[in-house]
Structure formats: C-alpha cells, structure tokens
Image (cartoon, rainbow, N blue to C red):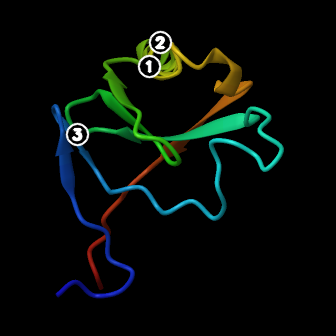
Amino acid sequence: MQRPGRRLKMMCIGCTFAPPLPPLAKTSIKADNSPMNELVFEVMHEADGGFCAECLSENIFTQGQTWEEVRRNVQEAVRAYYFDQADKAPRQIRLRLVRDELLAAA
C-alpha cells in the first residue's frame, strides 16, 4: 500500500513522471459548453538532458531534447488531440517547469 502524499513513478517513452493530479473541476468543457481557456502542462527536465511534458487535465504527453523543441511538440500534440473538435480546443497552453531535487538528510 502506498503512503498518502507519495507519487508513483511511471514510464513514458524514455520519460519518468508522476501521474497527474485529478482536476478540481471539469476542465475540458465549461458548463455553458464553451471551450476551455487554458491547458496546463507539467514539464520535467530529465536526467538525460531532455524534457517530458504531461498535460494535467487531458491525456496528452510529449517530449523534446530542448525547451524550444518541447514547446513545438506540445503545440503539435494539442492540435492532434483536438483535431476533430477544434471548437473545444484551448485558447492558451501553460507550461509549468518542475524541478525535482533530492537532498541528503543531515
């Protein structure tokens, strides 16, 4: 059994990431059926030097070797995810860079 507050490590084609937190509210479509304003991606800098990006509200994942490449890949992944429902696509994409550091206890 897993202790509360701990996050599992999962693999994503060469990326290590924690599973997304559940959304606080329905994020894909608002109550009035208008498109959402923003998608938020958690971007992790991997040990191999690349980046792995994971959307916190939809099942969208991508990666890139540089910051510019991951930015382009996120935009392409979002377009691909919403290719048949452009009216529901977000207006903005937010990239949240997460730094994970392990410190030795004194």
User: Residue 68: image x %, image y %?
Assistant: 49, 13
- 29 relative to 23 in the view: left or right: right
The quarter of the displayed image where residue 11 is located: top left
Position of the C terminus, as image quadrant, is bottom left
**Residue type of the residue flagged with mark 1:** Ala
**Residue type of the residue flagged with mark 2:** Glu
User: Residue 43: image x %, image y %?
Assistant: 45, 39
Q: Residue at x 22, y 83 (%)?
A: 2
Q: CA distance from mark 2 to mark 1?
A: 4 Å
Q: Nearer the viewer, residue 6 or 31?
A: 31
- Dot 2: element: helix
Q: Can you say whether 72 is above or below 22 in the image? A: above
**Residue at the disc numbered 1:** 77
Position of the N terminus, as image quadrant, is bottom left
- Dot 3: element: loop
**Residue type of the residue flagged with mark 3:** Ala
> Tags 2 and 1 in contact by the CB under 8 Å rule?
yes
Q: CA distance from mark 1 to mark 3?
A: 23 Å
The quarter of the displayed image where residue 9 is located: bottom left
**Residue at the disc numbered 2:** 76
Q: Earlier in the sequence, mark 1 or mark 3?
A: 3
- Residue 54 numbered mark, or none: none
Q: Nearer the viewer, mark 3 or mark 2?
A: 2
**Residue at the disc numbered 3:** 47
Q: Can you say whether 63 is above or below 97 in the image? A: above
Q: Nearer the viewer, residue 97 or 27?
A: 27
